[in-house]
Amino acid sequence: MILSASGAQWLVRLTSHAHLRLVQPGVAVDEAQKIFTNFVELYSRMGELIVQGNYALVAQTRRGVTTVQTEMDRVTDADGGANVVTVYLGRPSEDEEATIVEWV
C-alpha cells in the first residue's frame, strides 16, 4: 500500500504475520496505517529525520495499547527514491535495537 504523509510517499508492506496478529485481537489495518502516518507527521513537525532502521510505535487503539514495529529502508526505483516500510506487530526483542516512540 502507498501512504502519503508529510509530503512524502511511503510504500508500506504489511507482512502476512502482522496482518494476522492485527486481525486476531480486532485491530483494524487502517489503525496500524494511522499509527504509522501519525509517526511520520510527528517527526516532520519536530524536524526529526527518519533514517533507516527499526522503530517501535506504541499507540492507543480502540482495542487497547498496540505496538507497531516498523523497519525503514530506502530503495531507488525508476522514478528516483522510494521510502519502503515493512510493518510487524509487537515489541522488538531484547537483542534487537529499535527507536521506541510512545503516544500512550
Image (spheres, rainbow, N blue to C red):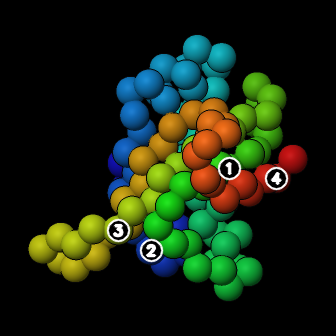
> Residue under circle 4?
103
Circle 4 — which element?
A: loop
Question: Which comes sooner in the sequence, label 1 or label 3?
Answer: 1
> Residue under circle 3?
74
Disc marking residue 8: 2
Question: Which comes sooner in the sequence, label 3 or label 4?
Answer: 3
Q: Nearer the viewer, residue 56 or 10?
A: 56
Circle 3 — which element?
A: strand
**Which one is closest to the eye, mark 1 or mark 2?**
1
Question: Which comes sooner in the sequence, label 3 or label 2?
Answer: 2
- Looking at the picture, which amino acid does disc 2 mark? Ala
Q: On the picture, is 97 further left or further right than 13?
A: right
The Cα atoms of the two marked residues, 4 and 2, are separated by 22 Å
Q: Position of residue 15 (x, y in %)?
A: 40, 34
Question: Which comes sooner in the sequence, label 1 or label 2?
Answer: 2
Q: Nearer the viewer, residue 28 or 56?
A: 56
- Looking at the picture, which amino acid does disc 1 mark? Leu
CB contact under 8 Å: marks 4 and 2: no
Circle 2 — which element?
A: strand
Disc marking residue 57: 1
Q: Residue furthest top?
A: 24
- Looking at the picture, which amino acid does disc 3 mark? Arg
In the rendered view, would you say 74 is above or below 1?
A: below
- Name which residue lies at 72% across and 35% down: 66
Using the rendered image of the protein, determine whether residue 36 is visible from the camera's viewpoint.
no
Q: Identify the image quadrant of residue 21.
A: top right
Q: Position of residue 50 (x, y in %)?
A: 55, 72
**Which one is closest to the eye, mark 3 or mark 4?**
3
- Looking at the picture, which amino acid does disc 4 mark? Trp
Q: Residues within 10 Å of mark 1 (few under 14, many from 20)?
A: many
The Cα atoms of the two marked residues, 3 and 4, are separated by 25 Å
Q: On the picture, is 94 further left or further right than 13?
A: right
